[in-house]
Image (spheres, rainbow, N blue to C red):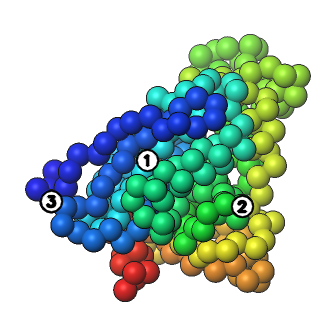
Amino acid sequence: MSALQVPARPFFLDASPGRRFVLFHAPAPQTECRGAIIYVPPFGEEMNMSRRMAAQQARAFTAIGFAVLQIDLFGCGDSSGDLRDAQWEIWKQDLVHAIAWVRHHASSRIILWGLRLGATLAIELARSSPYPVEGCIAWQPIISGEQYVTQLLRMRQAADMVATEALEGGTVQTLRTALKEGKIVEVGGYELPPALVADFDHIDLGTLDGLPCPVHWLEMTRSENASIPAARMDTVNAWIDRGIDVRVQSIAGPSFWGTREVVECPALISTSVQLLREAIA
């Protein structure tokens, strides 16, 4: 840890229902607070695999004068509640509580930063937040919630096949049927409750309209010469056609949220820092 950095302060933030576990990173000592950033984590095991990257990015942001609040959403991590009771709207309200706290204790200049499903949640909250949001930094946002759920169910199907329990687990379609019947499906040690899956299924960033702030969309690619998938660029172009201020940039590096071992992507961190430097210049 740099001598100019102070340890993050953990505490529980009052919310509804219950409380949320948060980590607050103050700006580096003797550095003017230029704004506050709220980190919205991805879902499930992706949250655990990306903790190192999130911590490194948070410290990099504080080094240039930003306060950072990392939050565990309802039913996730060390926060109150069970995942089986989680809802998309509860998670949005978690972010509203986080913004209110940060405005009171750090800065009224708010930027939302999220990864994968967390990036999608940040973008949606920016549209409806009762407090102004100056921008979103979106790392690899989920565009289609329905496709995302299908990917999760395929992971469950693959795990069943490896464990030779295919008859019990079934296909993606049978798992979908179980959810529609109100049954909870477990994926990678995490429960997928039917109500939350229904919330996910309604997510479609391609139809988004009327964002009040710019979105800095950072997309991971396998190599420097690799192009962003056409389907994802279709969403970006649709936003531009609707007047949304979206600025997409590709970063060569690993999909660190989905690897079996904890890996880093320094280029993503430095690019994110540069985005803020340019925003406050």
Q: In terms of secondary structure, where does tag 3 sit?
A: loop
Question: Residue under circle 2?
Answer: 128
Residue 210 drawn above or below residue 6: below
What residue sits 70% from the left and 72% below the top? Answer: 211
Q: Give the Cα distance between marks 3 and 2.
A: 36 Å
Q: Amino acid at mark 2?
A: Ser
Q: Give the Cα distance between marks 1 and 3.
A: 20 Å
Residue 164 drawn above or below residue 96: above
What residue sits 60% from the left and 44% below the top? Answer: 94
Query: Which image quadrant for residue 272?
Result: bottom left
154 and 76: which is toward the camera: 76
> How crowded is the residue under tag 1: few (<14 C-alpha within 10 Å), some, or many (20+)?
many
Residue 59 x/y as whole percent: 29, 56
Residue 191 drawn above or below residue 228: above
Q: Amino acid at mark 1?
A: Gln
Q: Which mark is residue 70?
A: 1
